[in-house]
Structures are given as C-alpha cells and as structure tokens.
Amino acid sequence: MELSLATRTVGEHTVLEVGGEVDVYTAPRLRERLLELIDGGARRVVVDLGRVDFLDSTGLGVLVGALKRLRSAGGSFALVCDKEPLLKIFRITALDQVFPLHPTVDAAINADPTGAGA
Amino acid sequence: MATVKLSFSPAPVHVRTARLVGVAVARRAGVREDLLDEVRLAIGEACTRAVALHRQYGLPDPVYVEMSDSGAYTVRVVDRAPIEASVGLAALPPDELAKESLSEDALTTGVGFALLAGFVEDLQVRPVDEGVGTEVRMVWPVGRA
C-alpha cells in the first residue's frame, strides 16, 4: 500500500497520521512533510503510526531526524503505536528508549512534558 | 528444490518488489505465517542496504537476490560495492542513536543492521566468492509441522 499522510491539529499539538508502507522509497516524502511542519512553526509534533503496515530503517532514520530537530528547537516529538510487530522493531533497535511511544494520540498529548495537553 | 532469482536496478522503488516476491516465495516454501513479517522486513533491509551502497559508489549494476527452499528457506542478497562488510557493524546503543553528531545515513545503516541481526537467527554477511561485493545470506526454517 502507498504511503498516506494527513495532518490535523489538536490544541497546540500537530498530529501527523501516517498510513501504508514507510520504506526507502517513500521515506523521503515523510521527511519532507515533517520538515514542512517544523519549518512552518510546529513545535509539538505527534506522529500516529496506527495505520502503518511496514516500517524500515530508512523510516526510523527520518523519525529520529525529526525528534532531534524538534528537541534542538525546544519542541517535543512523540509517536503513537500499539501494533506489536512495529513495537518489536523499536525494541530490537533500542529506539524504544529514544522515542516517547504511546498507545493513543490522547495519551501522547497528555504525556507531553512541554505541557499544553489539549 | 525451487529457486527464484531476481535482479533489479539499484533504485529504491524496486525494493518493495523484492520484498513482495521474497514473502510470496517464503509462503510457498512453507515458512511459518508468523515469521513472514520478519522475512519481509529482513529482505527489505538487505536490499535497501545494497541499493544504498550501489548509489553511494555510483554502480549501475543490478542488485541480485536469490531465494531457494532446499531444506530451509534461504535468501541471498548480493551487492557489488567495494567494501568489507560484516555483521559486526551492528547495534548502536540508545544514547548514540539520539546524538546530534550521528548523521541520518549512519543511523539508518546501524538500525538496518540491528534489524537484520535481531530478526534473522541464521544470518551471514560475507564477501562474494567471485569479484567484488558482499553477500547477505539469511535462512529461515521451513515448518510443515
């Protein structure tokens, strides 16, 4: 399935809903969209991976890039993921210790240490 | 014994094709359903790595993939890049992963190897027998239990 990207705003948070396959071919589009959001002033970003059915190292690299960019800008970045196959990918790469991972968008927003829950 | 061979131009768009073929052959070979996600991811990572290397070295040569089900399901992904690769390049610790100084490419390579090593119990990364390049060889059991 092709990559799908949809953005919505919840309070002060920008939620990017990602669906389909994030791989070496589609990850550049995810990177572009995240950069657009950050360059456009988004500082509290939640990426919802709920409809992602494939994620590879290239996609993970893009997500880490966004996390670093937001942290250095004083913002926050969190992921929403509750699918076991994807969670296993985060555990194996130790990225579960790098990203704040939450089961729902609400949980991600409420747990944001920079405040401003919806 | 059945063998499926595939070679593709080193372009990211073809990696998905290699994944789809790899999983289809795995299913037919009798690899357990619950392992197919891992097969898909591992073949994708091995092919992504090969494509990245060919592009990095400006090599137009195709990436070669061979799948066979003689006894077990074996997938070989062969690149032609002039480097000495090994599995030893694997896992970066979490504090390294989040470091500013680590480039996205370096991170992706490290994470890719961590996924291969984590998902493939029987994994070998070794120089090809003839010429220049590396072969990533992955084997999964064929469970007809």
Image (cartoon, coloured by chain):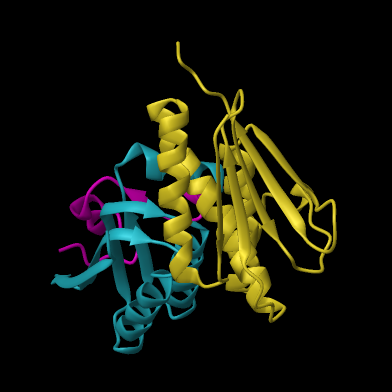
| Quarter of the view holding residue A70 | bottom left
x, y percent for residue B53? 67, 70
- Looking at the image, which is closer to me, B62 or B115? B62
Along the horizontal axis of the image, is B123 left or right of B82? left
x, y percent for residue A112? 31, 60
Which chain is rendered yellow in the image? Answer: B
| Quarter of the view holding residue B103 | bottom right
Along the horizontal axis of the image, is A23 left or right of A97? left
Which chain is rendered cyan in the image? Answer: A
- Would residue B31 be seen by someone viewing this image from the given angle? no
How many labels were placed on the picture? 0
x, y percent for residue A99? 44, 56
The residue at the point 48 percent across, 61 percent down is B15
- Return the residue found at the far bottom: A40
Along the horizontal axis of the image, is B21 left or right of B101? left
Q: Indicate the quadrant containing the C terminus of chain A: top left, top right, bottom left or bottom right.
A: bottom left
Q: Is residue B110 magenta?
A: no
The residue at the point 38 percent across, 70 percent down is A26
Q: Magenta region: which residues?
A: A94-118
Q: Indicate the quadrant containing the N terminus of chain A: top left, top right, bottom left or bottom right.
A: bottom left
Q: Is residue A99 magenta?
A: yes
x, y percent for residue A105? 21, 55
| Quarter of the view holding residue B81 | bottom right
The residue at the point 84 percent across, 51 percent down is B129
- Looking at the image, which is closer to me, B71 or A102? B71
Along the horizontal axis of the image, is B107 left or right of A112? right
